Structure formats: C-alpha cells, structure tokens
Image (cartoon, rainbow, N blue to C red):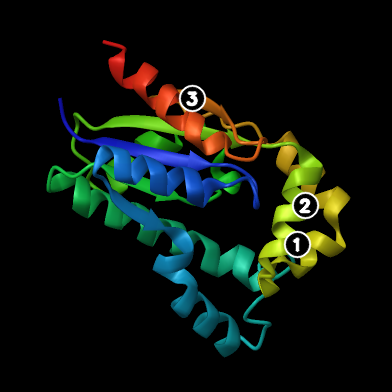
Amino acid sequence: MGSTLYFVIGPAGSGKSTVSTLIAQRMHAAYLDKDSVATFFTEALLEAAGTDKHERDNNEYYQRVVMDLEYRTLLRLAGDNLRLGNAVVLDAPFVRYFPRDDFLEKAAAEHDWPNDVEIVVVHVTVEGSRVKNRVDARGYERDAWKLAHWDEFWAAAQASECRWRGAHHILFDNSADGAAGNLEQTLAAFTATP
C-alpha cells in the first residue's frame, strides 16, 4: 500500500490546525498548512491588484483568481511528497470544492499523485458559538468579515457538505476543550481497520 493523504477540513475556528498537527505527529507525515504555504504570495497578489491584503471572504479578486492558485499549489506540494513515499496532512478549509464529487480524482490526475495513495478526509466539527469565540480570540485581520457577518458565514459553513468520493471520511467532534486528545482513539480505530 502507498502513502496516506489526510485532508483535515472544517470551518474557521474548528481546530483544524490542532487536529492536523496531531495527525502529522502521530503518522510522521509532512504537514502542509495552506496559510503557511500561501500567505506571502496571496498578500502580495491582493496588494498588487489594489485590494485589501487581509480580506478573503468578501474579496472578488481573491475568490476569482487567487484562491484556486493557493489550493493548486497546496495539492502540487502534496503530490511531491506522496511520490517520495511520504504521508501528507493538508490543513485547509477546502469548502469551495466540497460540491465536486470528482474533486479528488481530478486533483490526483492534475498533480500526478501515485495510484495507490490512500485518502482520508477528517471532518472537524464544533459547536457554533464556540467557533465564533475561537475565531474572535485568534485576532486575525482576515477574520473581520466573518465576525461582522457571522450568521451569514456560519449558515454557509453549515450548509456545505463534502461530497468527495474515493476517500475514507472520518467525523471528529472538536467541541469540548481537550477533545483533540480523543483523536488518538479515532485514528487508532481507523488505522486498525483492514
């Protein structure tokens, strides 16, 4: 069997980064965070286009041009690691791509992932008021629109269903403080499955 590619998905403030880093540590996997991969070039592109470098959710240029570049870069880096036999953890929302049931197949073809890669999608869920508190507490400028339009943002996040085929899907509730510790059991149960 080949390497494993983990997609850790969920709304802003759900704890994707905590869950992702725990998986990467446990599985000795490459950890690829979209913000670390793309923030510098994303901000430069947004400034060059004359838009607010911190605005994502309500920035037409970001949505139309930059976002796909971020994700394609992330998926290409995943391919580079998978071809070397490394397990990979991707930490990014991916919400725009949820409705595309063939998203994983197309990504694998475009970025030359090995045929025997095993894909695991970890859906990180959390109760809504806790998410808002986490987003507010982290203090990112790029979250200003989310916080100012919380009901709209949260309704859209809740309505998004990941329809990707060709992957194992795991639901992980990260609502309780310290819930990420339960991730060990969730992953152990998955990895023990033949």
- Residue 9 x, y percent position in the rendering: 53, 42
Q: Which residue is mark 3?
A: 170
Mark 3 or mark 1, earlier in chain: 1
Residue sitting at x 24%, y 49%: 79
Q: CA distance from mark 2 to mark 1?
A: 6 Å
Observer able to see residue 68 = yes
Q: Which mark is residue 132?
A: 2
Q: Secondary structure at mark 2?
A: helix
Q: Nearer the viewer, residue 158 or 181?
A: 181
Residue beneath the point at 16% across and 31% down: 2
Residue depth check, mark 2 versus mark 3: number of the one nearer the observer: 2
Which quadrant of the structure image shows residue 55?
A: bottom right
Residue farthest toward the top in the current orientation of the protein: 194
Q: Amino acid at mark 3?
A: Ile
User: Which residue matches tag 1?
Assistant: 136
Please say whether residue 99 is visible from this viewpoint: no
Q: Under tag 3, what secondary structure?
A: strand
Alpha carbon distance from label 2 to label 3? 23 Å
Secondary structure beneath dot 1 equals helix
Callout 2, which amino acid?
Answer: Lys
Circle nearer the N terminus (2, 3): 2
Looking at the rendered image, the quarter that the N terminus falls into is: top left
Residue plotted at (18% across, 45% down): 86
Query: Which mark is in front, 3 or 1?
Result: 1
Do residues under tags 2 and 1 come within 8 Å of each other at their CB atoms? Answer: yes
Query: Residues under labels 3 and 1: Cα distance?
Result: 27 Å
Q: Is residue 40 left or right of residue 155?
A: left
The image shows residue 27 at horizontal and vertical percentages of 27, 38
Q: Nearer the viewer, residue 143 or 136?
A: 136
Q: Toward the viewer: 153 or 59?
A: 153
